[in-house]
Image (cartoon, rainbow, N blue to C red):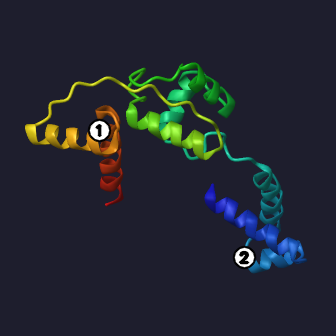
Amino acid sequence: MAQIETLARQAWQLREQGYAINDIANVMGRPTSAIERWIGCWLVIAGQAPPWHEGLNTHIVLYLKKAGITSREALVAAWENGDIKRGQSSEINVSRLVELRNWLEDSGSEVPEAPPRTMIIDLSPEAEVALNHLKRVTGQPASQLISRLLVEADELNRSD
């Protein structure tokens, strides 16, 4: 399909520059019927809007379609209503939720914060001392410090 789009765009551009169909056919080495068809196709292709889910992972898009979410507005409503939750299905894990949230924010939606998840972690004595020191220095609660450090470490790891 991409090749047809390219040929259609080229034929359209030549036509816009004032070339006759026969001249375009000669330049492109194709029959005039193909050139006429491509120019007609370009009018359709150029008028098409990208799909509402452009930029989202295909697994997420398939899950959303299965869940009956077929528009950006429906996705925003489902997000705001709490209909999309981590662990809801195998397609919706934490990284997918973050991806959805980033996509919604990047496309201009105000997205409410997802509630934090309670977790039990084991800290070595050294890590506990470091955490207590950071709590005193920053005045932030332990959960906020750990969350921030994990997200920063993940971002560093992903940028490598």
Q: Are marks 1 and 2 in contact (CB under 8 Å)?
A: no
Q: Quadrant of residue 33?
A: bottom right
Q: Earlier in the sequence, mark 1 or mark 2?
A: 2
The spot of residue 21 in percent (x, y) is: 87, 72
The spot of residue 97 in percent (x, y) is: 46, 33
Query: Foreground residue, 160 or 92?
Result: 160
The spot of residue 3 in percent (x, y) is: 63, 62
As drawn, is 63 to the left or to the right of 157?
right
Is 116 drawn above or below residue 16 in the view shown?
above
The numbered dot on residue 33 is none
Q: Which residue is mark 1?
A: 146
Q: Which residue is mark 2?
A: 29
Count the numbered circles shown.
2
Q: Quadrant of the C terminus?
A: bottom left
Within 10 Å of the Cα at label 2, are there few (<14), some (14-19), or many (20+) other Cα atoms? few
Query: Foreground residue, 129 or 94?
Result: 129
Q: Quadrant of residue 2?
A: bottom right
